[in-house]
Amino acid sequence: MISSFLGLQTSLRGLLAQQQALDVAAHNIANANTVGYTRQEATLGAADSLHLTAGALQTGAGAFLGQGVDVTAYRRLRDSFLDLQVRAQSMALGDATTSAEALDRVQSAVGEPSTTGINALMGKFYTAWSDLANHPESDSSKQAVASAAQTLADAFGKLAGDITSATNDANAEFTSITGATGPIKAAATSLAQLNKAIDSALDAGQSPNDLLDRRDQILDDLSQYGQVSVSQLGNGRIQVMLGNQSVVNDTTADWQTPPPAGFAPGGGQLGALKTLATTTLPGYLASLDAVAKTLHDDVNGAYGSAFFGGDTAATLGTGIPAASTITAGSGAGAASNDIATAIAALRDTSTATSQYGGLVRQIGSDAAGATNAQSIAQAAVDAAQDRRQNVSGVSLDEEMANMLRFQRGYQASARAMSSIDDMLDTLINRAGRVGL
Amino acid sequence: MRVTADMSQRHVLADLRRVQERLATAQSQVAGGKRIEKPSDDPLGAERAMRLNDQLESTGAYRTAVDESRSWLDATDSALSSLSEVVQHVRELTLQAANGSTSDAGRQSIKAQIDQLTEEAKHTLNSAYDGRYIFSGTATDTAPYSAATGDAYQGDASPVVRQIGPGVSVQVNVTGDDVLAGLLPTLRTLSAHLAANDTASLGTTDLQAIDAGFDNLTAKRGLVGAITNRVDAAGGRLDDTTDITTAFLADTQDADLPQALTDLSAQQAALQAALRGGATLIQQSLMDFLR
């Protein structure tokens, strides 16, 4: 025998389920602009049926009588494969952006082609010697040579200083990102706490969807610094590696500050900083030093004694002779100009200028390459995020339609309940009152 | 594809950013007039522009040397031309003195004139250009002849050389010794013969020696003229090089202005379209239609 009130119970389930589904829609809408939020869905399923034993039906068979609806799960609509894509592209973007910014800074310091760069100053230096060759007797020409040499050496020193400080800044940024107060350490601490909270929630049979969102968001953020790899430890807990170093293992934040010497970030911002500080920028400085050495050797060779003191970009300016002691020629006559002529002729024979041109071209290509890589990576990140949003993003229109759906469902369940109520009213209040 | 509000907003922003980047590039090309503002704009072009700038600087320096050489040679030629007039005058006087109808007293007066002309010859070669004695070899701070040292040449024999092109050098000077080494003794001998009224020598050996000195002088002037021509030709070539290099440099680094202006307006139109499209797209929602 079926209870007279079964229908009321069924309608109530309907009311509650539609209400919960509506709550989820409201949660989605509220988080439509939350970074890293994954849209959720209340999965509805028919409630367990009432089993009617054999003989319940006229045929003598048993039956299952539906008892309405239940919310079976709160699903989190996320594809972890798309997360991997986003993180890989975000790592490439971090790498390219960092390189592009540093190289742009270097090429601004180079400041070519211009009338004030080292190239122009080298030309003016040779021209000063050629003017001295025309006026070997003139003190003002000697003064011009001394000051052109000093200006040129200063420009070499300035550029060497700029490259060195870019190198130092890259090292400092690397240290501050990986250090005890840096974002990776903070991420490690948060991840350890989240691992613990997710573990307890799952133990209690709950769906810690919003905790998972926060953890995925931290991993997304982490991926701009380097190669993030995640391994599952069971029950929602994870181990996270950045390059070849562990960031968090289960509930232990084991990111070491500072990271060990063998730390290889595997790409990203940290990879770019490491490459810049150890390879790219020191390479530029070495090339600039080579230009300075060529200039030093060629000019000193033609001058016959020390003109430029040091043979690196930073030290080129030391010991440039005072204007009064500069000699234009080896002969006794005041108009003897063979030395000045020989140095002026270096403009056509010395390779310093073309070496420097090669360095500028190298820096330019590297900067152009990094800028291109940056826009490609940006496009790839956008595309990967689109694919993820396609699955996980909140569409307000969709939620709006869902709200309508659940609202109507709720209204209909309520209507069903009131008609059962009417029915019971008839039974309880009106039945058995014949003749009253 | 499910298009979410976040997605369309991001797309609109990304599109706007791209258009605005292109607009900024077009704008800076129009404003700066340069196609290459930093090496990454065109690494090879930047290197070429630097090389061409070098070449302009170097051509300018050689051009300065050409002008300087030219002034030096002009000063030399002008001094030698004055000297020629002096020698011509000496020759006329010598002819007059050799003539039997000239009295002894007249010869003595001619001798006085010849002595003065000898001093004038030395004085002519003491001419300075830009504060430098141009007939003293490289000893440009020493006058080639001075009253104290008589007829002895005070300069040196070293050449004054100017570089007027890559690997091209010219000697721009003629030393006082080159010009007067033969002539001064001739004039002194002439003076002695005049004092002694030696008309026979005056008409023969002295006249021949003066002619030889004049020929030498003419040869030197010819040499100076030839060098001047060479320097002028080098200057012309340098001017040609400057023109070609300047044009090539403009091709390399200057923005194509009509093209840049067209780009600018195209990008402006694109920006407006993107803004209008974005504004329409972002505003619309199902909420506008449900009640």
Image (cartoon, rainbow, N blue to C red):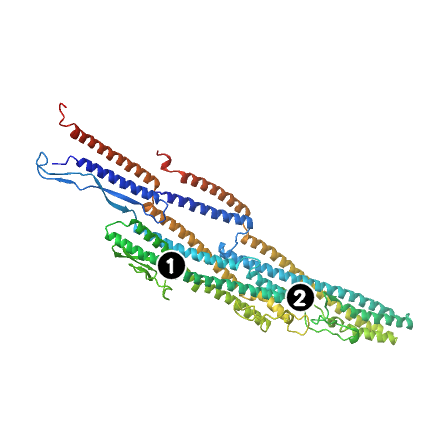
State the quadrant of the C terminus of chain A: top left
Q: How many marks?
A: 2
Helix, strand or loop at mark 1: loop
Q: Secondary structure at mark 2?
A: helix
Q: Quadrant of residue A47?
A: top left
**Residue position marked by numbered label 1 in the rendering:** A267
- Binning the other alpha carbons within 10 Å of mark 1 as few (below 14), some (14 to 19) or many (20 upward) gives many
What's the residue at 36%, 66% (across, down)? A260
- Which is more N-terminal, label 2 or label 1? 2
Question: Label 2: which residue?
Answer: A140
Q: Relative to A239, is B211 on the left or the right? A: right
- In this rendering, does residue B166 appear at all? no
Amino acid type at mark 1? Gly
Check disc 2 and give the amino acid type. Ser
Foreground residue, B60 or B231?
B60
Q: Nearer the viewer, residue B263 or B92?
A: B263
Q: Position of residue A159 (x, y in %)?
A: 52, 63
Residue A205 in the image: above or below residue A260: above
Percent position (x, y) of residue B216? 75, 69
Residue A385 location (% of width, % of height): 36, 49
Depicted B53 relative to depicted A136: above or below: above
Dot 2 crowding, Cα within 10 Å, few <14, some 14–19, many 20+: some
